[in-house]
Every structure is written in C-alpha cells, then in structure tokens.
Image (cartoon, grey):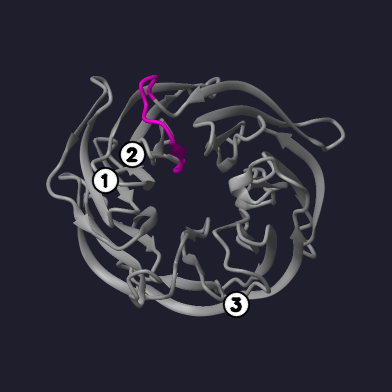
Amino acid sequence: MDKEKYVAYVSTYTSRNKSKFGIRIYDVDVENGRFREKDQVQIRNSSYVTISHNRKFLYSITDFGVESYKILEEGDLEPINHAFINGMRGCYLSTDYEDRYLFVAGYHDAKLTVLRVAENGAIGEITDEIFHKGLGSIAERNFRPHINCVKMTRDNRFLCAADLGMDHVVVYELNHVNGRLRQVDIIRSEQESAPRHLKFSRDGRFLYIVHELKNYIDVYTYSVDEHGNPVFDKIQNISTLNKYHAGGSAASALNFSEDFNYMCSSNAGDNSVVVYSINGENGMLTKCFCLPVSGDYPKDAALFPDNRHLVSLNHESDTMTFFNVDMEKGTLVMNGREMKVDQPNCIIFYRIQ
C-alpha cells in the first residue's frame, strides 16, 4: 500500500515584499517533518485560503475579492475564476458543507458577504451582504466592528461570524435556496476579549472560540432546541499561555490535528505555540505544552498529519519553523533550519494520495 502523500498550501501577503506569488505550494515530508517547495501561484495578498468540503477546490482572499482554483491530481492549482465582494479586502473565507455558498469575513469594513458557488467550483453572484454595526470598547480597534471569521455549524444550518471588535459571535440561519442570512442568536464574549477564530468539533457538538486579546479559548456545547433554534452553552475557558508569559500577547491560530485529537493555537508577542489534547466525549481541552516557536509573530501553526511534527508560520520574521513533537513528554524540539517565506499567514495540509 502506498504511503499517504500531502501538499501544504501557505497563503502570504505580497504588498511588503512586492512579490507576485501569494500562495506557495510545498511537498510535505511527513516522516521527517519538513517541506520542499513545489510551486508558486500568482495572486496578490492571499491573506487566507480554504478548501471546499468535497476537497476539489481551493478558495483564496485577494485584494479585489476572492479567487477559486481547481486542485489537480498532484496538488497543483488551476485558476477557475475570480469574483468581487463589493467591499474592502476580506480576511477569512469558508464554504457551507454542501459547497453551494462561499462566506467572506471583512475585518476592515465589518462586512459579511455570501456568494453562490457552482458545481465546477466557480464563484458566482453575491446573494447577501451584511454590515455589522455598533460601538466596540477597545480604542486600538477604533471602536468599530471587525468580522474576523465565518464558519457554518456542521449540521449546515447556522453561520457563526466572530466579531472581534464587538466581542461577540453573531449566529445567522442560512436559507439554502436564496443564500440569504437571518440573525437568530449572539454568543457574547467577555468585554475586550476579541473573539478571533472559531472551529467546530468533527461531530459538530462542540464549538471552540479563540480570543485574541484575552489569550484564551472558550469551549461551548452546540445543540438545536425543539423550535429549531441554536443553543450554545459554555463549558470551559482555558488559557493559550503559560503563567509566566510575555506581556502584550495576542492569540492567533486555531487548528485541529487531522485526526481531531489535538488542537493548536499560537501566541504573537509571546511567540509561542500551544497544543491541547481533546476529550472526544465531553469536548474539553487539556494543555499538552506551550513553548517558543523561534520566530516573530506566529500567525498560524499546525500539526503535521502524524502529530509528531509541527510548523509555525512567523509573519514578522518571514519564516516557517519546524519542530519535532512528543505529546506524552510535552516537548517541542527544533527540527532543522527555518524556511524563508514572506509574511506567511495561513497553512492547510492537503492529502493527495
């Protein structure tokens, strides 16, 4: 039986280095925990990428809107089309679980955009546009809403939009026929906590929200009541830092391991990565370790598919750093030299075989 083969897609900003290539594709050496550069994709400021749930297409943020790509047999990307989002550049995107709609989060203009997606992966027309309104409490955020993440519940009923300027997650019901959204709930976070990214467990019963400014993860149960309304109950609050952390830290990443047994996050400022084990029965997190990443401002961090290696994307030092991981011992040991990559922001491992 052939070994499983993977590529990694790394999205980057291009404005500072004036590069044309916003997406880098790497062959993944899982056994040794390293990358080899495979290809570069010409796109400006690909700040975030996502892969459709049918695993056929990749979607990326870019300056003017969004771009779609067909994923070829060996993991290369073939452009399909692009679409405007009728607003400022987005910061996050995701699809619903039927891959019929693409959701784009707008940090700068607090705009949530819904676009139709065709069966061939092409992005179609805008079906809904919602601006978050209100006054936040944090001066550095200009007292304004900032949508930073949009994810569907795994039953494909509700869209959750994390607004780190307003310290809450707005929950919308998706109309699957016309692509319109209707607000049905708000999950309120602690004031000045800045909910940044969110993920649902593989079975969909638990929601994890990482908070940028308070450096912690809140864990919620998710269910639907007899009236069809979403119900979220908080069951855990756990720090992304050690007690002796550096000041001025900001939590960034939130990623599951491929087998959903672990979750990792990263702390900019503290320049560390934290890994938790996940209790599959009750959804609770237990911290395995929180250790330095040997780079500046880790915007994303991810475990390799074997859970024995980890990569950190260090946005301000323009590097990726690699580590050997021992979950039982709680150790993170540097694995070879850093790799240079300009302003990396997001990584996805993708199995091609």
- Give the percent coordinates (x, y) of residue 187: 72, 35
Mark seen at residue 83: 3
Frontmost of labels 3 and 1 is 1
The image quarter containing residue 237 is top right
Going by the numbered disc 1, the residue's amino acid type is Gly
Reply above or below: 23 against 303: below
**Label 3 crowd (10 A; few <14 / some 14-19 / many >=20):** some
**Magenta stretch in the rendered image:** 242-254
- Give the percent coordinates (x, y) of residue 238: 50, 23
Q: Of the residues under marks 2 and 1, which one precedes in the sequence?
A: 2
Q: Residue at x 54, y 59 (%)?
A: 91
Badge 3 marks a residue whose secondary structure is strand
Distance from disc 3 to disc 1, alpha carbons, whole Å, reads: 35 Å
Q: Which residue is mark 2?
A: 271
Going by the numbered disc 2, the residue's amino acid type is Asn
Q: Of the residues under marks 3 and 2, which one precedes in the sequence?
A: 3
- Are the two marked residues, 2 and 1, in contact with CB atoms closer than 8 angstroms? yes
Q: Which residue is mark 1?
A: 295
- Magenta span: predominant SS is loop
Going by the numbered disc 3, the residue's amino acid type is Ala
Mark seen at residue 199: none
